[in-house]
Image: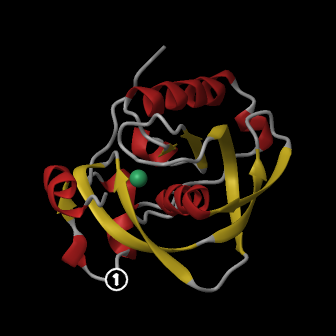
């Protein structure tokens, strides 16, 4: 188990466009090890997703896993571990919905981001097999957040404005309802 160092906002690797991964390259020990380490790092950091550029590797790969027990989110959904290579998104809705996002590369901050609520995700799994997955709501949100990382986009860029940009401490103090 290897926990990788997560690049933080300001690191140029987060702002570059990541390269597609060929099937041949995907099956190499180096890339398979990278994927294992991304999964370990995502779980260690209690993230719901992690994109390869966040661990200093500008390749089009992300991992995603949503557990209702995640301490960083109050989410009912469960999505088993997903590794996606060269993701392509097709939206199934036009209207975006607002929701809170955070990012392991922008620690301690949250903000409201409009995202489309329903999509189809296509790409390759870690063995190079084609996958097609329908996603909605928070699952669809995480897919959009992670795919953005592969294009050098962070959630701050997607906010309508910065008025909801909030430190985690204040988030739990002022914004959490119920
Ligand atoms: Zn992120």
Decide if residue 10 is in sight here.
no
Q: Quadrant of the C terminus?
A: bottom left
Location of residue 176 in the rendering, given as x and y in whole percent from the top left corner: 27, 58
From this view, report whether residue 2 is shown above or below residue 107. Answer: above
Q: Residue furthest right?
A: 129
Location of residue 139 in the rendering, given as x and y in whole percent from the top left corner: 60, 55
Quarter of the image holding residue 92?
bottom right
From this view, report whether residue 67 is shown above or below residue 100. Answer: above
**Side of 14 relative to 119 (left or right):** left
Q: Secondary structure at mark 1?
A: loop
Residue drawn at 44 percent across, 17 percent down: 2
Quarter of the image holding residue 114?
bottom left
Q: Nearer the viewer, residue 158 or 116?
A: 116
Asked whether mark 1 and ligand 1 are closer than 8 Å, the reply comes as no
The residue that disc 1 covers is: 160
Q: How is the image coloured?
A: secondary structure
Decide if residue 128 is in sight here.
yes
From this view, report whether residue 117 is shown above or below residue 174. Answer: below
Residue drawn at 37 percent across, 32 percent down: 45
Q: Residue furthest front?
A: 178
């Amino acid at each position: 188990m290897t926990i990788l160092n997560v690049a933080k906002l300001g690191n140029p690797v987060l702002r570059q466009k990541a390269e597609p991964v060929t099937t041949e390259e995907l099956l190499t020990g180096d890339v398979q090890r990278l994927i294992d380490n991304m999964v370990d790092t995502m779980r260690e950091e209690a993230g719901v997703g992690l994109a390869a550029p966040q661990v200093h590797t500008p390749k089009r790969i992300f991992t995603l896993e949503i557990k209702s027990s995640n301490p960083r989110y109050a989410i009912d959904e469960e999505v088993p571990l997903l590794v996606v290579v060269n993701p392509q998104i097709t939206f199934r809705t036009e209207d975006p919905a607002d929701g809170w996002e955070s990012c392991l590369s922008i620690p301690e901050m949250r903000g409201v981001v409009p995202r489309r609520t329903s999509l189809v995700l296509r790409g390759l799994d870690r063995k190079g097999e084609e996958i097609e997955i329908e996603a909605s709501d928070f699952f669809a949100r995480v897919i959009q957040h992670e795919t953005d990382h592969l294009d050098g986009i962070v959630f701050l860029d997607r906010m309508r404005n910065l008025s909801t940009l909030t430190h985690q401490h204040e988030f739990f103090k002022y914004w959490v309802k119920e």
